Amino acid sequence: MPFDLPTIRSHFPALRQPTIFLDNPGGTQIAQESLDRLTTYLIHFNANHGGAFPTAQASDALLEAAHTAMADFLNAKSPEEVAFGLNMTTLTMGVSRALALTFNPGDTLVVTRLDHDANISPWLRVAEDRGCRVRWVDIHPEDCTLDMDDLRAALAEKPRLVAVGYASNAVGTINPVAEITRLAHEAGALVYVDAVQYAPHGPIDVQAQECDFLVCSAYKFFGPHIGILYGRYDLLDSLRAYKVRPAPDLPPGKYETGTQSHEGISGVLGALEYLEWVGNTYGQDQAEKYRLLYQGKRLALKQSMGAIRAYEYELTRALLDVLEEVPGLKIYGVTDIHKLEQRLPTFSFTLKGWSPRQVAERLGQVGINVWDGNYYALAVTERLGVEDSGGMVRVGPVHYNTVEEIYKFGEELRKIAATTN
Ligand SMILES: Cc1ncc(COP(=O)(O)O)c(C=O)c1O
């Protein structure tokens, strides 16, 4: 069944406002299922771990269900490979410190110019602390794809770790993660994948991609503000986590420092229940593709993300058409319509005569939310030479956006372009 947008949108209370939400790469709106899990947790099950009383036991059971659901979403081998935390950045700071203990002075760590700073700075700090070398992998500035030749050259230096994004939060490029992990493993490196931007847009399979670590954030996929770490069990088990003594010695507990946002973790369960509903309702035509690989909830979640990816292709096409019509507008990233599978519907651009902030302000005044600046993808804006002029305007639909919204955005953008600033 094709997406029924009014029904999809009815699952998002925030969308009852007249606002056009194209600010999704900075955070999506929350699904009702997630909100319900959040409030139900706080009203009925609010307790700390391990108590001998019913609310604590119900709370622990819910947290376990959320780990299982997240393992289903990522196709992890077991729920023990999933740890929750404050956000992706904090989880990465923690794991990078644990990994740092295994690095030696002179070891090489690879980072890329396409990444969000949350998958760069933690490794720069590790390198500083441990006397490691940092090897930057460049991008092709003309279409903002990763320079795979440069990556191969970096791997020839036998790095210990490759930190790479699944998709760029700035320019929407999707990296060939399976190929990158294969090459990195051949070179003897571990791979740390930042899937924060990709997670709301397409299916992830950590086993097929052979990721060692993968991180994402539920507030980018229709849940609350909380981060998620996947790690291969043997790695999570063998690393020495920064933890307090009475906390569990085994994964995932050894990485879940302090008392977590239990309501947030329940909210993740709700967001995944929403996606499962999408998969069962609208993803049947994806079944053929995934049936042999997945079953049950895992199949429903893959159908869901497959259907979302297919629908978003329409949004990508519409957005590209709209942007290309605006005089004086420069798009950064993949624009070749034959290569759109290499990008998300996340587009960044500059408009002649207007600063990115001014464009975002004007759109904000007519109820259209877009971001401007560098969105912490500092390496990208520096590489593209736009950091000192206010970065870029970023517009990023997700599956609850409509083609009509894209056209409305285009109409308003053309009005701005036609006005002298
Ligand atoms: C690609 C990417 N990585 C990492 C982050 C940081 O995530 P968090 O806010 O969960 O720390 C973001 C946030 O925008 C992002 O887009």
Image (tube, helix red, strand yellow):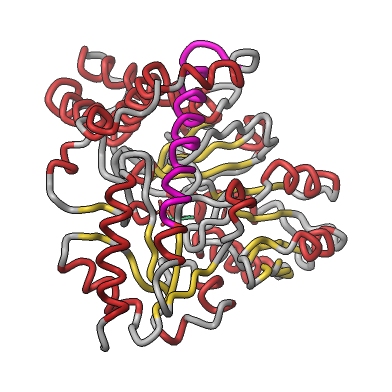
In the rendered view, does 307 fall on the left or right side of 261?
right
Residue nearest the observer in this picture, 186 or 405: 405
Residue nearest the observer in this picture, 398 or 411: 411
Identify the image quadrant of residue 240: top right
In the rendered view, does 253 fall on the left or right side of 223?
right
Image-quarter location of ligand 1: bottom left
Residue nearest the observer in this picture, 360 or 39: 360
Q: Is residue 146 above or below residue 228?
A: below
Report if residue 317 lies within the magenta region.
Answer: yes
Q: Position of residue 211 (x, y in %)?
A: 66, 39
Residue name at image x 56 percent, y 77 percent:
384
User: Residue 254, can we see it?
Assistant: no
Q: Position of residue 245 (x, y in %)?
A: 46, 39
Report if residue 98 lies within the magenta region.
Answer: no
Dominant SS in magenta: helix
Q: Is residue 224 above or below residue 112?
A: above
The region drawn magenta spans 294-319
Residue name at image x 63 percent, y 49 percent:
192
Q: Position of residue 172 (x, y in %)?
A: 51, 56
Q: Position of residue 210 (x, y in %)?
A: 70, 35
In the rendered view, does 327 fall on the left or right side of 5?
right
